[in-house]
Image (spheres, coloured by chain):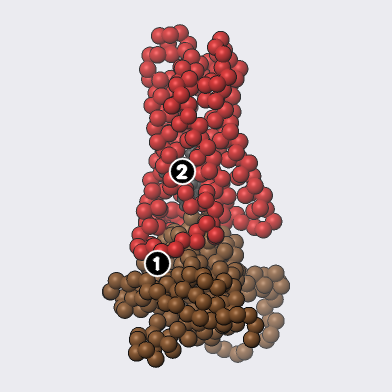
Chain colours: A red, B brown
Amino acid sequence: MGWLSEALGSSIGKKFVMGFTGIGLILFLIFHLVGNFTLYGGPEAFNGYVHTLDIVKPIIRVIEVGLGLVFIFHIYNGIKLWWENKKARPNDYKISAKSKNTTFFSRTMIQTGSIVFIFLVLHLATFWWLFNFSGEPHEKGDAYYAIVVEWFQIPWYAIFYVIAVILLGFHLNHGFQSAFQTFGWNHKKYFPFIQKLGTVYAVIMALGFASFPIYFLFFYGGN
Amino acid sequence: MSGKHLNLKLKIWRQSGPQTAGSFVDYQIEVSPDDSFLEMLDELNNKLESEGKEPIAFESDCREGICGTCGLVINGQPHGPIPKIATCQLHMRNFNNGDTIWIEPFRAKAFPVLKDLIVDRSGFDAIMNAGGFISVNTGGVPDANEILIPKEIASASMDAAACIGCGACVAACKNASAMLFVSAKVSQFALLPQGKPERFRRVEKMVKVMDDLGFGSCTNTYACEAECPKGISVTNIARMNREYFLAKVKSKELEV
Ligand code: HEM
Ligand code: SF4
Ligand code: FES
């Protein structure tokens, strides 16, 4: 299988890994957002949703391992690409005209990605860890919804959450169409549509996820 | 001739050799708006020579946008501010009296500066030698139109073949990636029946050499297409990626 690792290690191969894992994460985000909307249904709806996931826990665990690997490959390859690409131009230009020939989103993938990564660590350390491995939800008696409310009412947490998901939207706005281009799916018949679809997707994700902390911080009046 | 003369301040990268450190040197010049950019540099060099100073080294040959030697980075843009032209086709009427113009060489690890504004682009030759050709055994002259090629295919191939190998795509890319150039060369052959027999080996070898030379990886910012003097489309990069995946899955060669 030497040919395979060689292929995936080439410049185009690394891009393929980025695109493939990126699309995996894009699909995951859709399910994640749809599930989270049960928060607007109140404690019963959300806790019910968490319980439904609990019933199929073995399957969820397998998916989680897969998702973890996808994240690791995406982040490892992204940092590697960024580092190697920096080395490909050791002396930069005195005058930059990058804003004339590229979009802001395309130039800042490593920055937006890195902040999403910091967010991810915090996100896992709070909700995922508390839900799965701390006694907290059970001690307080089915307190999944309560935990979410509690965290989202902490201003710094809510504000960081909003900033991070907006930057995630920036990342997705470039990443969505970029993955299609990487796979070679660029045709003038449909590519303009792909680019628009990517922007729509990115806006929905950013606004969708940002809506939860905004709701619980400003508009939630308690049960 | 038309218009008033322009008084310009030039900040030009001077570097005496590949190993020495370079820096920007200021020059003041008065030019006609009808001058081309390279004529301005010629005039400046005449002046420098008459003063007994070392002229500025830059490359040019055809001066009509077909040889690809004349690339300069002008105020941060390869081939200057006007789209779809080479530096030699840029005229001073596109600048204003009193402007400051920064002139830099292409900058990439794979394009080391040789002197002043001249860089070594022989990496492109190495990529071409790896697969930018078709192997034709000698024999009788084939009849015209013996191999039928649909017009759209021929046009797409010719569009890709319009690449003049200037390297502006590398210069423009934040990753110094050569994907637009290599994809244009891969596409021009891969599209035509004559290029099909060697298509897998070609793309595998050309990409391998491109990677080994230290060009960066594409991140789809599309700066290359925006700055390419021939308007080569990034759809060629998409085509090359398809060719590459297909080659990796189907080609018989385990080592490239
Ligand atoms: C849910 C989270 C994420 C999603 C949905 C996502 C999605 C994507 C997509 C679709 C691409 C485009 C791939 C391509 O061009 O073929 C991409 C590129 C990239 N991602 Fe992410 N990403 C996420 C998180 C991250 C994180 C945490 C990092 C951490 C450093 C990161 C770093 C990068 C970088 C540097 C690129 C640019 C690579 C390139 O264009 O070649 N991403 N991402
Ligand atoms: S693709 Fe365009 S910019 Fe790149 S070498 Fe060819 S002509 Fe020059
Ligand atoms: S001198 Fe030949 S392309 Fe400019």
- The answer to whether the beta carbon of the residue marked 2 is less than 8 Å from any atom of ligand 1 is yes
Label 2 sits on what residue type? Thr
Can see residue B129?
no
Q: Is mark 1 within 8 Å of ligand 2?
A: no
Judge by depth and name the residue closer to the eye, A102 or B136: A102
Q: In this rendering, is residue A136 above or below B195?
A: above
Residue shown at 46% from the left, 61% from the top: A96
| SS assignment at label 1 | loop
Residue B41 on image: x %, y %: 47, 82
The amino acid on which the numbered mark 1 sits, given as a three-letter code, is Ala
A28 w.r.t. A187: above or below? above
Report the number of numbered marks: 2
Q: Residue at x 48, y 26 (%)?
A: A158
Determine if marks 1 and 2 fall on one subunit. no
State the residue position of label 2: A112
Label 2: chain letter: A
Residue sitting nearer the eye, B101 or B129: B101
Residue placed at 55% from the left, 21% from the top?
A218
Camera-nearest residue between A5 and A153: A153
Looking at the rendering, which quadrant does residue A126 occupy? top left
Question: Which quarter of the image is occupied by the C terminus of chain B?
Answer: bottom left
Mark 2 Cα-neighbour bin, 10 Å: few <14, some 14–19, many ≥20: many
Which element is circle 2 on? helix
User: Residue B108 shows which numbered tag?
Assistant: 1
In screen coordinates, is B66 left or right of B252? right
How far is disc 1 from disc 2 in space, using C-alphas? 25 Å
Q: Nearer the viewer, residue B184 or B142?
A: B184
**Residue B74: image x %, image y %?**
49, 70
